[in-house]
Image: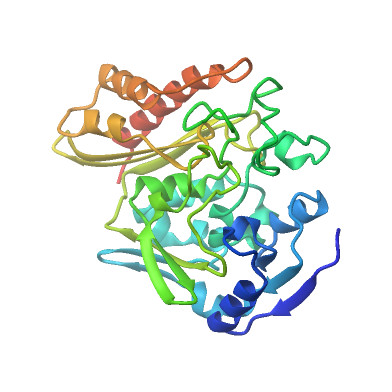
Amino acid sequence: MRPFSYQRATDPDMAVQALSAAAAANNPLTQATAQPLAGGTTLIDLMKLDVTRPTAIVDINPLAQAWSAIEPGSDGLRLGALAKMSDVAAHAEIQRNYPVIANSLKLAASAQLRNMATLGGNVMQRTRCSYFRDVSYENCNKRNPGSGCAAMDGVNRMHAVLGTSDQCIATYPGDFAQALIALDAVVEITGKGGTRSMSFAELHKAPGNSPDIETTLQPGELISAFSIPGRWPRSVYLKARDRQSYEFALSSAAIALDVQGGTIRDARVGLGGVATMPWRAREAEALLKGQKFDEALAQRVADAAFADARGRRHNSFKIALGKRVVARALQQAVTMEI
């Protein structure tokens, strides 16, 4: 590790000021010279690998008392950004009315990591692309802008088939984010100007020509909470991976349905393990609305979800796998008892 300064923030204003003062001008939070420390389950890894080289660490754990509440209500759910993944996954109300959230958290990482990791840190985690995480590879546009993408012609089995560009095909690794994007979550952001809110779908950026800019957060801004409108008791998170635990998704699906009298009134489809950012399959959702479920419909929905997918030498299997995951998740959601 490289040397860095450490500061413990005791209130949101202090955290924002400390991060803003040390941040590189006009760079997003993920590239700033200052980094917030919560659970540290991703940050410490990246610092050890020399991928992230902050000159300042701002410990925001003292904010947990105000930013870790789990608040289900009749009109939705509010989750503090410093709530632990394990606490949210184990919450009875979330298991009952938002199983897609509970399961996306249960299937992530290990029990030890879930006890440390926070919701805000989880959605901000960076790709597990081996070329990004190994600094001996210089040609990584996400880590070294303008240097190229080694994954294009390298081993790309774990890489994305949706949302890619000719600059980057790195996969967004998280699980919880797929549930958030499927449920139209709103993210609350605290910064120098106070608190602002935006759709979670606007938080992450596709790589385009600037893969190094991963989010729309400004220097010094912190995620303080997430809000999910409504209740979604008929929802599932299905994850296909190389082993049953402690592994990232090859393909996953976050499905939420509103079914009345056998007819699908509303449908949400989020995809994980296959895209460069949390992915909402709106074309697939449109096919479900107003329909009665059967296997033929599930196949059409799955095909629509991957209509724009582009496979490469080692990861083309993700397209067929992803379709099967979507179809199976839909079947589980339709038949689940609520």
- Residue shown at the point (67%, 36%) measured from the top left: 129
In this rendering, the answer to whether 197 lies above or below 146 is below
Whether 147 is drawn above or below 184: the answer is above
Q: Is residue 257 left or right of residue 86?
A: left
Residue pictured at 34% horizontal, 29% vertical: 331
Q: Nearer the viewer, residue 214 or 224?
A: 214
Place of residue 46 in the rendered image (x, y in percent of width and height, measured from the top left): 74, 52
Residue 304 in sight here: yes
Q: Quadrant of the N terminus?
A: bottom right
Q: Could you tell me residue 34's position as x and y percent?
A: 68, 67
The residue at 66%/64% (across/down) is: 39
Rendered image quadrant of residue 121: bottom right
Q: Which of the pair 111/51 is nearer the observer?
A: 51
Q: Residue 107 versus residue 155: which sits nearer the camera?
A: 155
Residue 51 coordinates in the image, percent (x, y) = 76, 49
Quadrant of the image occupied by residue 308: top left
